[in-house]
């Protein structure tokens, strides 16, 4: 009995050594310049890179499925070194689980569109976008940024629009990065933004949800790299009560606890025939208002603001979120100043009215759309 048991065990061991392991049968195919592999045994597809006849392709779109199989992975170094690849659209890739190491490294990639949503979370692995030229990144789905996936990338701005996890050195050596905007719940590990600014500073704007810093974290970035921290009024109390946020900077009292900055929105306001000035700014969340004054150019006078308000100067109070002013509504409108006779005339027989002025010695008609036209049909600025 013991002898039989011995040989039975020996036979089992031999079979385990010499019997080849089961290997899934993989097939390859291409679509729209992209090569895929898929397997009925595994039940999913992965992206291999550019097809042989599409090496110079400048943009790609990755779908949610390929030949009926969910696209779950972009393979390691799949597009690495693709010399003309500038745009990657993953917006429809809802089954994507992994963007592997070096997947898009060393490419001239300028635009990355992440999925609008993913079914199980998306892991972006180390150096996935190493040395690319992406300037702006919108995090639009659940993402795990694993150990420097955007190392030495050209990023200038990152917008966190969806829950994600940011691990150490996520944006390592992204020397152009200047702004991180948080409007969703984000989990930050120790040194999440380590060695980002390379001797300069980047700012953090927090508008809707206060990001959570891991309990073991001692800092988010190298001391001196963090510039201003702007926080929405309704998050201010939580922010000041969070010991981790108070500890992430060497000099937390030097941080700027701001509300909504109209000054940063002003460049977006296009003013014609005059200018816009700020007479007073917020001093606290309780006094979070700006006073604006519309200044007319010579020959013009203030008419109204774009939202119909005629008060000038006017006081505006934002919604409690970072830079939440509607610049379009705060545009001042001016009209030509009358020097003499004013006459109301109709235009094209409609009820729309145009005004006729004697302006600086010439007849000027101000049209309903605000344009000033002289007798020669020329627009007067």
Image: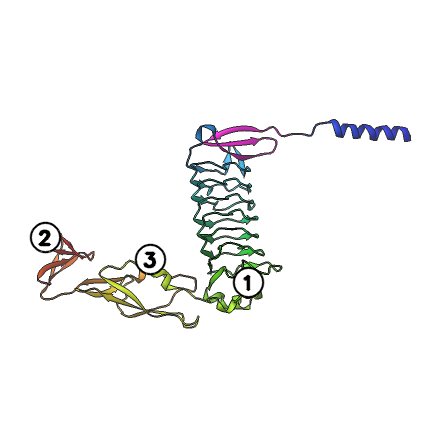
Q: Quadrant of the C terminus?
A: bottom left
Helix, strand or loop status at disc 3: helix
Q: Nearer the viewer, residue 369 or 279?
A: 279
Q: Which range of residues does the magenta coloring cover?
A: 22-50
The CA distance from mark 3 to mark 1 is 32 Å
Query: Where is mark 2, residue-wise?
Result: 376
Q: Is residue 211 left or right of residue 301?
A: right
Helix, strand or loop status at disc 1: loop
Q: How many marks?
A: 3
Q: Nearer the viewer, mark 2 or mark 1?
A: 1
Q: Nearer the viewer, mark 3 or mark 1?
A: 1
Is tag 3's residue or tag 2's residue first in the polypeptide sequence? 3
Q: Which percent across, then down, holds residue 36?
A: 52, 32
Label 1 packing within 10 angstroms: few (<14), some (14-19), many (20+): many
Helix, strand or loop status at disc 2: loop
* Numbered mark located on residue 339 in the image: none
Q: Is residue 66 left or right of residue 319?
A: right
Query: Where is mark 3, residue-wise?
Result: 268
Q: Nearer the viewer, residue 310 or 178?
A: 178
Q: Which percent across, then down, holds residue 17?
A: 75, 29
Using the rendered view, name the quadrant where residue 20 is placed. top right
* Numbered mark located on residue 248 in the image: 1
């Amino acid at each position: 009995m013991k002898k039989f048991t011995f040989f039975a065990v020996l036979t089992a061991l031999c079979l385990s050594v010499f019997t080849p392991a089961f290997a899934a049968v993989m097939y390859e195919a291409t679509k729209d310049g992209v090569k895929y592999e898929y397997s009925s045994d595994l039940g999913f597809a992965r992206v291999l890179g550019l097809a042989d006849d599409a090496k110079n392709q400048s943009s790609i779109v990755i779908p949610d499925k390929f030949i009926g199989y969910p696209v779950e992975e972009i393979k390691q170094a799949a597009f690495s070194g693709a010399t003309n690849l500038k745009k990657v659209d993953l917006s429809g890739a809802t089954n994507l689980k992994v963007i592997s190491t070096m997947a898009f490294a060393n490419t001239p990639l300028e635009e990355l569109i992440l999925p609008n949503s993913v079914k199980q979370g998306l892991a972006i692995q180390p150096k996935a976008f190493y040395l690319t030229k992406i300037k702006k990144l919108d995090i639009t789905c659940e993402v795990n940024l694993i150990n420097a996936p955007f190392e030495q990338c050209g990023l200038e701005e990152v917008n966190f629009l969806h829950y994600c996890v940011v691990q150490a050195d996520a944006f390592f050596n992204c020397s152009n990065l200047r702004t991180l905007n948080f409007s969703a719940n984000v989990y930050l590990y120790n040194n999440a933004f380590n060695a980002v600014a390379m001797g300069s500073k980047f700012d953090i704007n927090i508008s809707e949800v206060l990001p959570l810093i891991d309990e073991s974290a001692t800092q988010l970035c190298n001391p001196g790299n963090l510039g201003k921290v702007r926080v929405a009024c309704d998050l201010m109390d939580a922010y000041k009560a969070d010991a981790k946020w108070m500890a992430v900077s060497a000099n937390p009292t030097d941080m700027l606890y701001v509300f909504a900055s109209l000054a940063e929105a002003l460049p977006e306001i296009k003013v014609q025939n005059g200018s816009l000035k700020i007479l007073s700014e917020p001093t606290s969340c309780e006094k979070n208002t700006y006073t604006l004054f519309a200044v007319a150019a010579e020959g013009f006078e203030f008419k109204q603001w774009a939202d119909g308000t005629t008060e000038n100067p006017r006081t505006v109070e934002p919604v409690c979120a970072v830079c939440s002013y509607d610049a379009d509504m705060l545009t001042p409108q001016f009209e030509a100043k009358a020097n003499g006779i004013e006459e109301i005339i109709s235009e094209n027989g409609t009820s729309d009215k145009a005004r006729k002025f004697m302006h600086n010695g010439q007849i000027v008609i101000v049209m309903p759309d605000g344009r000033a036209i002289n007798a020669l049909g020329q627009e007067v600025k």
